[in-house]
């Protein structure tokens, strides 16, 4: 998760910019440990937060140096002013606005409160908030799509290479078989010719021998 320090907030509150927030309890806890924030309900102060800034241009993450607060029904959270938590009315959301109370540091349980369109500077579930490529969900979806496309591309490349290798082996095998078959035919042909020549020579010798024998009888 890339982040950079955001200036302008009150002294003692270190605020960092980010464009994605944890959406699960385990990821939220991991981020809390990374930031050296308090973990669990034993400590009322210094809990980890990742919420929108007041301008909705990005998320901010920080360890809040004040006590946890009870969230009223129908509200999300933002970091407003010079660094204090503000509740944000979400009752006009298309869906996802909580109809129950929850602790402020458990905002990760409300996905609609952590889904922004940074270009339009609005919550994605707000009426009229266009879902563009830089909304939180779209960022994740685009990354998954890119990973899938890369995977499919690699599979296609490997398949093409294997197919080419197999075809090459088949062609070489066919050529080798044809070469062996040709040599066999040549050998058989030479052998037959040699046998005929030898037979002709033998017959000629026999005729000469018979002719000489006949002459000897008459003499």
Image: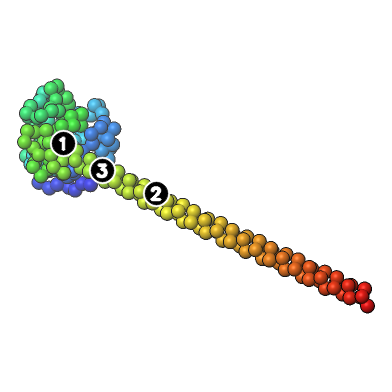
x, y percentage for residue 207?
81, 70
Q: Is residue 189 above or below residue 132?
A: below
x, y percentage for residue 129?
8, 37
Between 182 and 110, the one lying in front of the other is: 182
x, y percentage for residue 189?
65, 63
Q: What residue is drawn where x is 93% and y is 73%?
A: 217
Q: What residue is drawn where x is 62% and y is 60%?
A: 184
The residue beneath circle 1 is: 115
Judge whether residue 192 can be spotted in this image.
Answer: yes
Left or right relative to 202: residue 215: right
Q: What residue is drawn where x is 25% and y is 32%?
A: 24
Between 31 and 205, the one lying in front of the other is: 205
User: Which circle's residue, 3 or 1, is located before the other in the chain?
Assistant: 1
**Mark 3 or 1, which is nearer the eye?**
3
Between 19 and 144, the one lying in front of the other is: 144
Q: Crowdedness of circle 3 by 10 Å Cα count: few (<14), some, many (20+)?
A: few
The residue beneath circle 3 is: 145
User: Which circle's residue, 2 or 3, is located before the other in the chain?
Assistant: 3
């Amino acid at each position: 998760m890339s982040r950079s320090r955001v200036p302008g907030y009150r002294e003692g509150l270190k605020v960092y910019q980010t464009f994605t927030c944890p959406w699960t309890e385990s990821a939220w806890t991991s981020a809390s440990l990374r930031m050296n924030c308090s973990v669990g309900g034993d400590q009322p102060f210094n809990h980890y937060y990742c919420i929108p800034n007041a301008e909705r241009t990005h998320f901010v993450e920080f360890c809040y140096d004040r006590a946890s607060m009870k969230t009223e029904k129908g509200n999300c959270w933002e970091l407003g002013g010079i660094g204090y938590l503000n509740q944000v009315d979400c009752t006009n959301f298309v869906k996802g606005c909580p109809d129950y109370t929850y602790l402020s540091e458990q905002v990760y349980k409300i996905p609609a409160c952590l889904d922004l369109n940074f270009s339009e500077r609005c919550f994605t579930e707000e009426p009229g908030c266009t879902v563009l490529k830089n909304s939180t969900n779209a960022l994740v979806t685009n990354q998954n799509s890119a990973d899938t496309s890369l995977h499919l591309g690699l599979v296609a490349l490997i398949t093409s290479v294997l197919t080419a290798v197999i075809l090459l082996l088949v062609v070489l095998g066919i050529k080798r078989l044809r070469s062996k078959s040709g040599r066999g035919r040549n050998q058989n042909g030479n052998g037959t010719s040699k046998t005929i020549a030898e037979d002709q020579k033998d017959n000629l010798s026999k005729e000469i021998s018979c002719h000489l024998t006949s002459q000897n009888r008459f003499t």
